[in-house]
Amino acid sequence: MTFTLQLSDETLITQPRLAPPESETHKYLRGHAVVISGSELKTGASRLCARAALAVGAGLVTILGDRPALCEHAAHVTAIMLKELDATLSAIDDRVRAIAVGPGAGTDDGLRFLVLQLLALKKPVLLDADALTVFSGNKTLLFNALSEDTVMTPHLGEFARLFPDIATADPVAAAVEAARRSGSVILLKGSHSVIAAPTGRYSINRHSSPWLATAGSGDILSGMICGLLAQGLPAFDAAAIAAWLHGDIGVRAGAGLTADRMTEYIPLVLQGCLQEG
């Protein structure tokens, strides 16, 4: 599939255009995404992330983790592959196009080292949740490892821990400064999320719903961004398009929406983009 970012007046995100895959495509051409698992009894967030990456169009998705965690995943997933994560990251080969780390990952020193290892692979990386919090005491270490192919998706609390001196009264100015300072794409989550690139470019997503304010919703957003990165979208475009698609889930689903049902709406959201595109 081919997504095209659509902006109104250069800042407001509108419904993206979606072209179907070429007839000769195969799963690896559609992109291989990797999601780092949480530990045993904390696997739900990474599983939500992986399911969203697959549903938004990645050709295949692998969850990497230790064996006890993978045993939990095995009871819940079928189309998603499971592999053990070793110290050399041998499971992340040249066919892997994007990596998501953070949802349910914990905040110990091991995660900090793992994030730096993943960033050193020079592949597009989505950092969320614990992968941000773990660097609260050493932000420079993280920023020195980031690139314009990295997307960070903090909510206001996580943003304050990484950028304590940047006021968030003006979310656009805050996201733009954070992106410039970190050298990565920032998606500052909120009722109107702001996406900013290190160049100063930014966009705003107002297509959303308060029904998205439920546990695990951010993990779905992270998975959608990772899935779009795996399909070859630039980091800014992937974050902006995912923000709109995620918002459309809330608009379509309405009352009673929970994160474990969100992936059921992704095909409907994509079909809407096909019809309009």
Image (cartoon, rainbow, N blue to C red):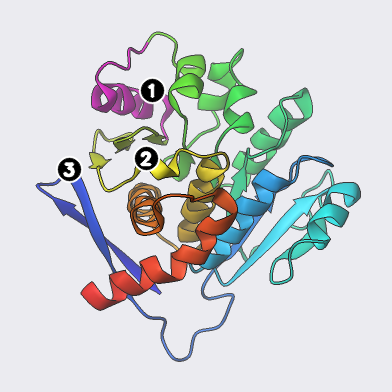
Number of numbered discs visible in the structure rendering = 3
Q: Is residue 92 visible?
A: no
- Which residue is at 46% across, 16% downward? 160
Q: Nearer the viewer, mark 2 or mark 3?
A: 2
Disc 2 marks a residue whose amino acid type is Pro
Mark 1: which secondary structure?
A: helix
Give the quadrant of the C terminus: bottom left
Asked if the magenta segment contains residue 167, the reply would be: yes
Mark 3: which secondary structure?
A: loop
- Residue 157's place in the image compared with 255, above or below, is above
Q: Disc 2 versus disc 3: distance between alpha carbons?
A: 22 Å
Disc 3 marks a residue whose amino acid type is Thr
**Badge 1 local density, few (<14 within 10 Å), some, or many (20+)?**
few
Q: Which residue is mark 3?
A: 11
66 lies left or right of 125: right
Q: Which residue is mark 1?
A: 181
Q: Residue furthest bottom?
A: 23
142 lies left or right of 239: right
Q: Which residue is mark 2?
A: 210
- Residue 229's place in the image compared with 78, above or below, is above
Q: Disc 2 versus disc 1: distance between alpha carbons?
A: 30 Å
Going from the N terminus, do you reach mark 2 or mark 3 first?
A: 3
- Which residue is at 77% across, 49% downward? 89
105 lies left or right of 66: left
Mark 2: which secondary structure?
A: helix
Going from the N terminus, do you reach mark 2 or mark 1 first?
A: 1
Asked if the magenta segment contains residue 178, the reply would be: yes
Read off the magenta span: 166-184
